[in-house]
Image: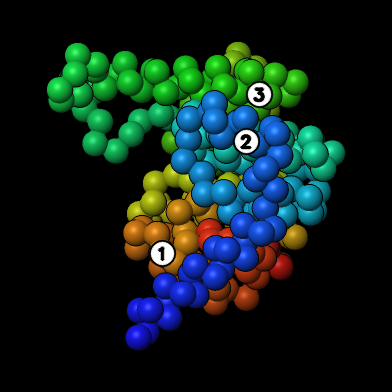
Amino acid sequence: MKIIERIRTFVNRRRDSLRRVDVSSEFTRRLFHANAGMQDVGNLHAFSTAIRNLPTDHPIVEIGSFCGLSTNIIRHYQRQFGKMNPLFCSDKWEFEGAQPGKTIPGTNITYDAYRQFVKDNFMRNVRFFAADCLPYTVEVFSDEFFELWGARSAVSDVFGQRVQMGGGISFSYIDGNHTYDFARRDFENVDRFLDVGGYILFDDSADACPFAGVKHLMKELKQNPRYELALQCPNYLFRKRS
């Protein structure tokens, strides 16, 4: 009976969240059709909530960009709400289980070629849907990204843009490695720079998601007095209190 109640609660939460999400807008429908990626539609409500209420004009930071779907969604809501904070993305495009120098079983496609294909798709998608304001995209793992951020390093991104990193962060979308240790470290790194009133959205953090490490981190954050749960639809969006 408890399992049935849990399922019913999850379905009701998801139905309620979808009622509040504008998934029928022309842009978002076209974007979801054309831009490869894995996004729960509930994230649209979380993105719009965070971006509409950004506490400062400090940068937005995205950890994990894949083919650029979330990047383009973020830019869309920035335009909608007139919040054109700089957007920084961190992705190395190295995927779990990939074997550099080898061929994907059953194909003549190498893992290296697949990696380059995904990166090229990110660049093509972002150049098309966000040509008016390209994000600063740094091709590093998140740990190295925050080392560069903390050192206020000047870097060249994948688009050839030169930019200085560092300073406060107004909102961060975390969609990197989903093990507990990595997710926790991503949170701690963001927390060092996140503005009071700033937001963190954790992808694949819904109660029904299979990633035990991320779900364990969500339980910890719900007990953290410095953060409040701003939204769950079904992924977790937290706001920094202090």
Q: Position of residue 152 (x, y in %)?
A: 64, 35
Q: How is the image coloured?
A: rainbow
Circles 1 and 3: CB atoms closer than 8 Å: no
* Inter-mark Cα distance, 1 to 3: 31 Å
Q: Which residue bears the numbered disc 3? A: 129
Placement of 131 over or under 62, stated as above or below? above
Classify the position of the C terminus by image quarter.
bottom right
Give the mark nearer the N terminus: 2 vs 3: 2
Residue type for callout 1:
Ala
Residue type for callout 3:
Phe
Q: Which residue bears the numbered disc 2? A: 29
Q: Residue at x 46, y 74 (%)?
A: 8
Q: Is residue 183 visible?
A: yes
Q: Nearer the viewer, residue 177 or 161?
A: 177
| 163 to the left or right of 207 | right
Q: Residue at x 66, y 23 (%)?
A: 129
Circles 2 and 3: CB atoms closer than 8 Å: no
Placement of 188 over or under 157, stated as above or below? below
Q: Position of residue 34 (x, y in %)?
A: 54, 26
Give the mark nearer the N terminus: 2 vs 1: 2
Placement of 160 over or under 27, stated as above or below? above
**Of the two numbered discs 2 and 1 in the rendering, the one whose residue sits closer to the viewer:** 2
Q: Which residue bears the numbered disc 1? A: 208
Circles 2 and 1: CB atoms closer than 8 Å: no
